[in-house]
Image: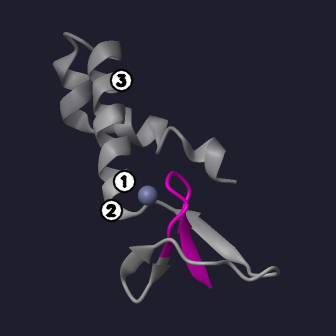
């Protein structure tokens, strides 16, 4: 099963991400390519900083990220 980036729609092939045609009945699993993953993480970090500004304890414990997961997961169904 190939993996498709749910942000830029590229497909992972042999560890490279490209815009390639999808077969009509192909089953794809969704994820993030490294570039989009980084972008999402930065976005998430910005959100977390905004939300928990001044609450350094929550930031350091890592609980904040665990609770929010990837944030955009809903778009990847
Ligand atoms: Zn991508």
To which residue does mark 1 refer?
37
What is the x, y in percent for residue 13? Answer: 46, 85
Residue at horizontal 40%, vertical 63%? 33
Q: Which span of residues is magenta-colored?
A: 1-11
Dot 3 or dot 2, earlier in sequence: 2
Which disc is residue 47 wearing?
3
Which numbered dot is residue 34?
A: 2
Q: Quadrant of ligand 1?
A: bottom left
Q: Residue at x 32, y 57 (%)?
A: 35
Question: Marks 3/2: CA distance?
Answer: 20 Å
Q: Is residue 25 above or below residue 70?
A: below
Residue 51 is inside the magenta segment: no
Seen at 32% across and 44% down, the residue is 39
Mark 2, ligand 1, within 8 Å: the answer is no
Q: Is label 1 within 8 A of ligand 1 (CB to nearest ligand atom)?
A: yes
> Which quadrant, please, contains the C terminus?
bottom right
**In the displayed structure, does residue 42 sit left or right of residue 66?**
left
- Quarter of the figure that contains the N terminus: bottom right
Whether pointer 2 and pointer 1 mark residues with C-beta atoms closer than 8 Å, the reply is: yes
Report the Cα–Cα distance between label 1 and label 3: 15 Å
SS for tag 2?
Answer: helix
Of marks 3 and 2, the one in the foreground: 2
């Amino acid at each position: 099963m190939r993996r498709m980036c749910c942000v830029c729609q590229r497909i992972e092939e042999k560890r490279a991400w490209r815009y390639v045609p999808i077969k009509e009945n192909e089953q794809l699993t969704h994820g993030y390519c490294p570039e989009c993953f980084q972008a999402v993480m930065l976005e998430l970090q910005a959100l977390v900083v905004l939300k928990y500004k001044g609450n350094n304890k929550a930031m350091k414990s890592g609980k904040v990220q665990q609770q929010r997961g990837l944030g955009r997961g809903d778009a990847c169904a």
